[in-house]
Image (cartoon, rainbow, N blue to C red):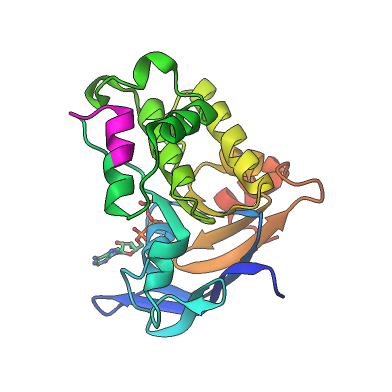
Amino acid sequence: MSDVVICASNLCVEVQSKKILKHVSFTVHRGEILALLGGNGAGKSTTIKTFLGLLTPTSGSATLAGVNVHQSPAIVREKVAYLPESVMLYGHLTAVENIRYFLSLSGKPKTDADIIESLKRVALQESAWHTVLNGYSKGMRQKTAIALALLREAPILFLDEPTSGLDPVAIDEFNRLVTQLAEQGSTILMVTHDVYGACHVADRIGLLREGEIVGMFDAPDHGNIDSETVHNAFIEGVVA
Ligand SMILES: Nc1ncnc2c1ncn2[C@@H]1O[C@H](COP(=O)(O)OP(=O)(O)OP(=O)(O)O)[C@@H](O)[C@H]1O
């Protein structure tokens, strides 16, 4: 299909002779949010690392917009914004300074007015724009990282456990923002072990267990997947 943006095709990954991903296949279409849900050690981070080109598959392929990331690694820098579980920004710089610095590194400088516009869009409170990040909460750091991702205009977002450690208000704000980004055409792959968060925000959920996709769930009205069904499958090993 022409609007497939992220595609894992029979992806197998081994680390130190251990099979971590076993024939993982999924697609994410433009404007869609796919959550890969799995317990500790299921292979969630390995999937993201493979798509970032940090791990090489033993077989199968990982493609972004039809381009194999291991054959043409530049595609990752061009198209992807990645939010790791712990956002890596400089604590001694302000939000504006951090963003200005990282945009200059990526060769896509923006004006301070653009940066402020983006911080407004992610609803980072004005009092924090020129405050060093050392005093920030996790939610505030995350908003700064998302503002940076927006300014990089990356059409693909990878989110690793994006809501872990956030309070319910911050989770709600985060989910709303991610939904908005998808509605505007971003394609989003998130990995998480939060059943209810995934059901709330994702269009589809892939259940990952011991390196295999063992279930795929979706909802006709998007972002409203039946959490009890997914919870039962997660806990009891019931495959949809
Ligand atoms: N560098 C490595 N060397 C050996 N085994 C590894 C390595 N990296 C990951 N693994 C193993 O691969 C499996 C999947 O790890 P991965 O980090 O992808 O899981 P995860 O689903 O992200 O888990 P978590 O929720 O705990 O972060 C685990 O069993 C882990 O022990």
Q: Is residue 43 left or right of residue 121?
A: left
Picture quadrant of residue 226: top right
Residue 50 vertical placement versus 135 (above, below): below
As drawn, which residue projects farthest toward the bottom?
59
Secondary structure that dominates the magenta span: helix
Residue 182 is situated, as x and y percent measured from the top left of the image, at 63, 48
Place of residue 192 in the rendered image (x, y in percent of width and height, measured from the top left):
48, 48
Above or below: residue 125 compared with residue 199: above
Q: Which residue is farthest left?
A: 92
Residue 69: x %, y % from top left: 42, 75
Is 144 drawn above or below residue 83 in the view shown? above
User: What is the quadrant of residue 195 in the picture?
Assistant: top right
Q: Quadrant of ligand 1?
A: bottom left
Q: Magenta includes 86?
A: no
Q: Residue at x 43, y 32 (%)?
A: 143
Please state the horizontal and vertical placement of residue 98, each as a whole percent of the image.
28, 36
- Which sits in the foreground, 237 or 48? 48
Magenta stretch bounds: 92-100
